[in-house]
Image (cartoon, rainbow, N blue to C red):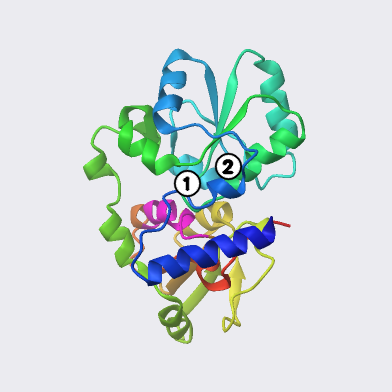
Amino acid sequence: MRILLIAALSFIMLTQASGSKALDLPYREFYPEVEVIELADLKSGYDKGDYLIVDVRAAAEYEAIHVKGAVNIQYSNSNFLNKLRNLASANPDKKIAVYCNGIVCIKCYKAAEDAMYEQIPQVYAFDVGILAWAKAYPADTVLNGKEIENPEQQLISESSFNQSCIDFDTFKKKAEAGNAVVIDARDPIQRKNKLPGLEKTLNIPIDKLVNNIIRKGHMKDKELLIFDQVGKQVNWLMYYLVASDYNNFYFLDGGATAVLKKQEYR
């Protein structure tokens, strides 16, 4: 499986480099046993009350934005499967849809695959992710504790987010500055390999970064250089940074995966 994932990512990067359009959901074919559910189908089941929706991301991401009524069970938590099994047992008449940040985030696939191997029934991967849901169904999305009323105003635009993303060479050059702090915001299970050329990196997962640093206003005098696994978690981290008046921060475009050319879970 790991070799297939590496090959898939290499193919995606080659097609992007050659100007060809990559697959919309590049990892789906590498989890052929995982049952997936499409956006419209999930909304239909959601409206009928047929589904329980589980957000498998970090708590800080869930607090920033989530499907209205979704339960947060973090895939990185060692008790993930026990919690998911208890939820399924308590609701035997319900199907379960697990979601993450979508597209190149593989947490929902891993969560659904693990559930299948543990014989937890009727667990589906919603692999399009939370942003697609928010754009399609803003009234059924909670952003910063409130339902979205005007997505164009309330959601940070793609162009604004992209302006805060820089390539790896630029990231490394900025890291050499005296006031720069490099933060690895990946989950511990994703942090098997370090990024080359970054000698001084603080390992602070998203939840701790939000609660212990950003909400307390620490490091505002520094230039924050932050990277996650695939460049998706930092999208929601930006909401916390902006709300707390941070104005000197950059994200690694594509996250660690863009540099390491693979995603790994121990």
- Residue type at mark 2: give it: Cys
Q: Residues within 10 Å of mark 2 (few under 14, many from 20)?
A: many
- Figure check: 258 above or below 134: below
Q: Quadrant of residue 164?
A: bottom left
Say whether residue 266 is visible. yes
Picture disc at residue 108: 2
Q: Residue at x 49, y 15 (%)?
A: 49
Magenta residue span: 230-241
Q: What is the x, y in percent for residue 130? A: 43, 40
- Image point (45%, 57%), residue name: 234
Determine which residue is flagged by label 1.
102
Dividing the picture into quarters, in which one does residue 123 lie? top right
Please state the horizontal and vertical placement of residue 236, each as a whole percent of the image: 42, 51
Image quadrant where residue 131 sits: top left
Q: Pointer 1: residues within 10 angstroms few (<14), some, or many (20+)?
A: many
Precedes in sequence: disc 1 or disc 2: 1
